[in-house]
Amino acid sequence: MPGRPEVGTNLWNLLYEPNDEFTLQKIENEVRRIINLDTRIELHELEISTVHNTIRVYLSISLIPNADTEQFYIVFNQEYQTAEIII
């Protein structure tokens, strides 16, 4: 497989999975895996929720060494196949 297959995310593969606790856990595991790939990011809070055809991921992170904390949502819309970052 060319490139670096360990970098990037598999979240798009989960968009059409059942909206259940098993899928939410897979999403959480994938978000944590991606964050752990970059040692410059410290995760403070992660919450995942769903509403209808939308998966919402809330993150609170710090960028090291600055320690500036950023909080934002990543909203995946299954119906429109889009992702949006909301600060």
Image: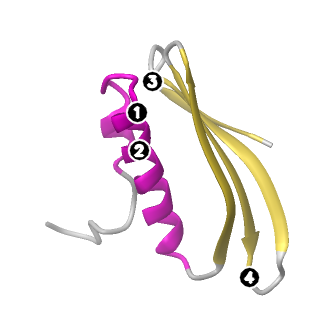
In the picture of the structure, the residue carrying the numbered disc 4 is 64
The answer to which of marks 3 and 2 sits earlier in the sequence is 2
Q: How far, Cα to Cα, is label 4 from label 2?
A: 27 Å
Apparent side of residue 45 relative to residue 11 in the rendered image (left or right): right
Which one is closest to the eye, mark 3 or mark 2?
2
Does the magenta segment cover residue 77?
no
Q: How far, Cα to Cα, is label 4 from label 3?
A: 32 Å
Numbered range of the magenta stretch? 10-38
In the picture of the structure, the residue carrying the numbered disc 1 is 21
Q: Which secondary structure lies at badge 2?
A: helix
Does the magenta segment cover residue 13?
yes
Q: CB under 8 Å between callouts 2 and 1?
A: yes
Looking at numbered disc 2 in the image, what kind of residue is underneath it?
Answer: Gln
Q: Which secondary structure lies at badge 1?
A: helix
Q: Residues within 10 Å of mark 4 (few under 14, many from 20)?
A: few
Looking at numbered disc 3 in the image, what kind of residue is underneath it?
Answer: Gln
**Residue closest to the eye, 58 or 38:** 58
The image shows residue 72 at horizontal and vertical percentages of 75, 47
**Residue closest to the eye, 31 or 44:** 44
The image shows residue 25 at horizontal and vertical percentages of 41, 44
In the picture of the structure, the residue carrying the numbered disc 3 is 81
The image shows residue 81 at horizontal and vertical percentages of 45, 24
Q: Which secondary structure lies at badge 3?
A: loop
Q: How far, Cα to Cα, is label 2 from label 1?
A: 6 Å
